[in-house]
Amino acid sequence: MQDKMPMPPVWWIKSIIILCALIFGVLYTLPTFFGNPSEWQRDANGVPVKWHDRIAENFLPSSRVNLGLDLKGGLSLTLNVEVEKAVQDSIIRAITRAKETILNEGIKTGSFKVNEDLSATVEIENLAQVQAFQKRINEQTLLLLYEKTIGNTLYFRANKTYVADFEKQLMQQAINTIRNRIDQFGVSEPNIFQAGNTRIVVELPGMSDTQRAKQLLGNTAQLDFRLVLNSITQEQLPVLLSEARKSLKISEDDTLPTTIETLSQWLRDNNKLPKNATIILKRVYGQGAQAGKVISNFPYLVESHAKLTGDLIEDAQSVQTAENYIPQYSVSLKFKPQGAKLFGEITTQAADPKNAPHEVAIILDGNLQSAPYVKAPITGGNASITMGSGINMAEQMKQAQDLALVLRAGALPASVKVVEERQIGPTEGAQNIHAGVISTIVAAILVVVVMLIIYGLSGLVANVAMVFNVLLILAFMALFGATLTLPGIASIVLTMAIAVDGNVVINERIREEIRSGFNQKQAFYKGYTTSFRTLIDAHITSAVAGIVLMIYGNPTVKGFAVTLLCGIVCTLFTSYYVTEVIGQWLVERTKIKRFG
């Protein structure tokens, strides 16, 4: 009897590569099935109680496959970003800066107005200085284009091309800011994407504190600093507001910042307020049984446009102070160099003897947070915001921490509103997981049975490669911290079919070679050689479709596409090389009569 030939070196190299891939698949897939370490039972020393949890913590990688919103449950919020209002505010700030700059050059300008269509008008005293003022506007913003001059009024129209680009930048900045806030909030694998021109969808898997999430995401944190004015006494302001309310038929209970601005605009239009002034309310909280409840609103007259905004803040931290022996929480601010310069200018102006009451209004989201008295210019680039004194300490601490968080992450470039809220409970997620597992098992059983019936032993090899394929997909997803969703499970089921489809091609080629007169060994090698190009072409075609879905699809489709692409790469490896190595051993080292 002739001795069997040893396996060639290439076979051993391929076998070692497959063994390494198998070890990698097992090591990175197992941790996902042990659950989240934060949910394990632990003893007093923090060591997991169950033996398999201890093994997982000490010997297995920490990477796991994250579950998406539809599998884990959580919160989905749709936010509407008021980009048009943000563009309008940007134009107002630019005109204000231009007016201040040109005033230093001895050129006086009058009132200005920015309309809803983003056109603007500015009054100027000396028509000979029109060109100089146009130049200052162009230096401050590209959102406006000079149109004409009628009398002493300059007319500007919106630069539509730049406005469109600016709105896109605002949306991207809003998405980045929301992502930064969520990262600091500690939610893993959030899904954030733009839906339409002005809406952002935020999906937070595993989120349970719904109210706080809405506050953090919906809190614009638009912070600005303005000089408190004295052209109208504090006693007159409530009377003027009441007059405006009666004229506009607005209830006394409506104290929203937008409503107060509407009342201020009416007062300006009727020459009851200076053109450069507006009214801001400061909330006064109750004490004792009414702690935390707003009992009144105290009006302040401040500059209508901010000179310094929160985007120039470098850092913000929550701190506890004890002013007048009363413990309070505040937020300590550190400005960027440009912000420090502007803050120094504002406090210098406030400390001027001509500018009583020498206060700087700190305004957050349209509400006056505090108005500290300024004795001397503050040039160090630091400031603080004191939380409401009528709020209990626990609420003060929470508000200070949240405000510091959103200021560190950055103020949203525009106001946002939660327009839709959808919550998926853990029970719904468990049902989705159960349905996905059942569908995967049923699909796997059907594929296994069909392959065994049609191809016998080679079908069994294909089924082993299919299981290996799923193992590798889960391992790669865990390695990169990918998120598994219900469409992702559907993609895995589809990948199982693609995996065995490659082996169908190979087995049919082997059968064709046998029918052509080749023996089993010759047919095996020729079948794998001739089918390789066909497999490459088929997988590239599928990969192109997956790439298109990943680029142009919504996040749900992208999750499907990413899992599919990962499956295609693993499928090419398992359906060709893994089955070839096993098949080659069977053909060379056993008495198998038929493979394919």
Image: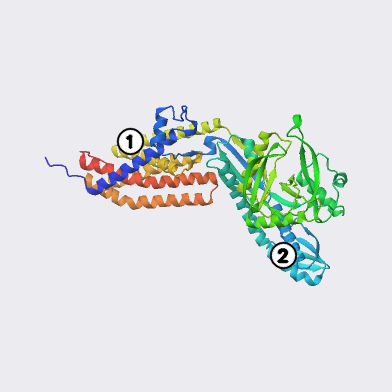
Classify 10 Å Cα crowding around label 2: few (below 14), some (14-19), many (20 and above). many
Q: Secondary structure at mark 1?
A: helix
Q: Which residue is mark 1?
A: 452
Q: Quadrant of the C terminus?
A: top left
Q: Secondary structure at mark 2?
A: helix
Q: Position of residue 402 (x, y in %)?
A: 63, 41
Taking depth in this image into account, of 487 and 446 the one nearest to the observer is 487
According to the image, what is the colour scheme of the structure?
rainbow
Q: Position of residue 283 (x, y in %)?
A: 76, 40
Taking depth in this image into account, of 475 and 231 the one nearest to the observer is 231
Q: Position of residue 458 (x, y in %)?
A: 30, 40
Classify 10 Å Cα crowding around label 1: few (below 14), some (14-19), many (20 and above). some
Left or right: where 449 falls relative to 200: left
Rendering quarter of residue 417: top right
**Residue 27: mark:** none
Q: Tag 1: residue type?
A: Leu
Q: Residue at x 25, y 45 (%)?
A: 12
Q: Can residue 168 be seen from the camera position used here? A: no
Q: Position of residue 14 (x, y in %)?
A: 28, 46
Q: Is residue 448 above or below residue 120?
A: above
Left or right: where 584 falls relative to 324: left
Q: Which residue is mark 2?
A: 137
Q: Is residue 248 above or below residue 142?
A: above
Q: Can residue 336 be seen from the camera position used here? A: yes
The CA span between labels 1 and 2 is 77 Å
Q: Earlier in the sequence, mark 1 or mark 2?
A: 2
Q: Tag 2: residue type?
A: Ile
Circle 1 or circle 2, nearest the eye: 2
Q: Quadrant of the N terminus?
A: top left
Taking depth in this image into account, of 350 and 191 the one nearest to the observer is 350
